[in-house]
Image (cartoon, helix red, strand yellow):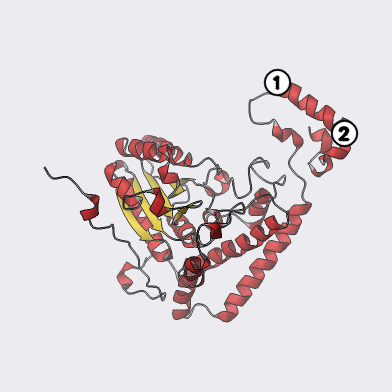
């Protein structure tokens, strides 16, 4: 008898292209389909996310929005992987994928409309901040707080894409991609999604952001196996572990995963991007209750995707302190301007509370709508109806 002992097996290696000085040690690993202009754009998008996160987290402390989650330490995963996906691919994600939305076409007004729940929000102000909705513009379905539910959604979408592309015999086949954290990989949805994707050969890419924490629980307390990539093997799925601070490795891994996912009729691929959550889990969390500042500091000052890519750009003569200062000043000014503009926007119509549940209001909904209207008319000082599009008439 030969029992498999995981402690005797070698750990899964981590794919990377840049070293920690931003130097490419093997030029043959570099993507050949990316221009210097695109690399600079990646950097600008990551800096945008960083500054947006800082301003909106501060805005939450000021009471201007109710909640926020930042992406510090994971910007390279989001921007690099989104750049490698196809324009018509279907994406489902969690709540730390601001960079995915930015890379795929979200502009400042889109972000602010959702964060401040204005009438311009496609989600009609129903969801928490940072739970963006941009399927028509970006191919990314609405974010949900329920942990892990987006993973089987991506498997189902991939199976539908496979059937549709097969029927139309398209020359541009599509994949689905699901973003999730290491904590979500402990949910049953993760396991069901992987097993179904494997048995039905679904062209889906499972993108795990292993940032070291599931809220306050470090990975060493979450599981005993070799990360998340090792789980894919048990389901018969190819996997790759990648340095999530290296945007070139992220891009190349996602690009190759997409090619493999579409190969020979389709199959699932899992990517485990290793990173570190520099920030608190959310504005509702104080991470220094369960970790030290000394642990965070190296990742914040040195070992993060923005610092790494900046070193690369400076080595290549594509960036300098002047451009850095100009970029950060411009982005900060634009964000503050759009934030103030969004604060003056009307909220969605009051009737949107009841809309989109059924094709027509049910008797119960209509009764509830009338009762809400009665109360708002009787106690106008208790409600801010004028802040909503159409005022009380919008109900």
Q: Assess disc 1: are there few (<14), some (14-19) or many (≥20) residues with their C-alpha within 10 Å of its C-alpha.
A: few
Closer to us: 23 or 61: 61
Image coords of residue 267 (percent x, y)? 32, 43
Callout 1 secondary element: helix
Do labels 2 and 1 touch, CB within 8 Å? Answer: no
Image coords of residue 99 (percent x, y)? 53, 57
Q: Is the residue 320 above or below the residue 309 in the image?
A: below
Q: Quadrant of residue 9?
A: bottom left
Residue at the image point whose x is 52% and y is 66% from the top? 293
Closer to us: 87 or 371: 371
Q: Does the rendering let one see residue 263?
A: no
Image coords of residue 338 (percent x, y)? 71, 59
Q: Is the residue 57 above or below the residue 187 in the image?
A: below
**Which mark is in front, 2 or 1?**
2
Q: Is the residue 316 above or below the residue 2 in the image?
A: below
Image coords of residue 119 (percent x, y)? 72, 44
Residue identifier under label 2: 379
Residue at the image point whose x is 66% and y is 62% from the top? 55
User: What numbered label is drawn on residue 364?
Assistant: 1
Horizontal arrangement in the rendering, residue 255 relative to residue 350 (left or right): left
Q: Farthest residue toward the left? A: 1
């Amino acid at each position: 008898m030969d029992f498999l002992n995981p402690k005797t097996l070698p750990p899964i290696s981590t794919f990377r292209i840049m070293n920690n000085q931003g130097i490419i040690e093997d030029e043959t690993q570099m993507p050949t389909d990316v221009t210097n202009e695109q690399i600079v754009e990646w950097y600008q998008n990551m800096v945008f996310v960083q500054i947006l996160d800082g301003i909106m987290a501060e805005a939450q402390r000021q009471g201007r929005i109710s909640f926020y989650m930042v992406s510090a330490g994971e910007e390279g995963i989001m921007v690099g992987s989104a750049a490698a996906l196809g324009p018509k691919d279907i994406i489902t994600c969690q709540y730390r994928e601001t960079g995915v939305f930015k890379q795929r076409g979200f502009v400042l007004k889109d972000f602010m409309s959702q964060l401040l729940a204005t009438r311009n929000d496609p989600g009609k102000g129903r969801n928490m901040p940072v739970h963006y909705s941009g399927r028509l513009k970006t191919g990314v379905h609405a974010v949900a707080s329920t942990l892990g539910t987006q993973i089987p959604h991506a498997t189902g979408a991939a199976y539908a894409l496979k059937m549709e592309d097969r029927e139309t015999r398209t020359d541009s086949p599509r994949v689905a991609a699901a973003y999730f954290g290491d904590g979500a990989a402990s949910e049953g949805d993760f396991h069901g999604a992987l097993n179904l994707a494997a048995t039905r050969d679904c062209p889906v890419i499972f993108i795990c952001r292993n940032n070291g924490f599931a809220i306050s629980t470090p990975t060493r307390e979450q599981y005993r196996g070799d990360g998340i990539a090792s789980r894919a093997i048990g389901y018969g799925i190819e996997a790759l572990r990648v340095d999530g601070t290296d945007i070139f490795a992220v891009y190349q891994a996602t690009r190759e995963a997409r090619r493999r996912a579409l190969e020979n009729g389709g199959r699932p691929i899992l990517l485990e991007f290793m990173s570190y959550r520099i920030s608190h889990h959310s504005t509702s969390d104080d991470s220094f209750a369960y970790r030290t500042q000394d642990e965070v500091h190296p990742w914040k000052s040195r070992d993060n995707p923005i610092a790494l890519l900046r070193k690369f750009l400076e080595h290549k003569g594509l960036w300098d302190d002047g451009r850095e200062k100009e970029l950060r000043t411009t982005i900060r000014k634009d964000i503050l301007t759009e934030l103030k503009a969004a604060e003056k926007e009307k909220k969605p119509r009051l009737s949107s509370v009841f809309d989109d549940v059924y094709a027509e209001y049910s008797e119960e909904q209509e009764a509830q709508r009338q009762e809400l209207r009665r109360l708002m008319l009787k106690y106008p000082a208790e409600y801010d109806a004028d802040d909503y599009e159409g005022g009380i008439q919008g109900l």
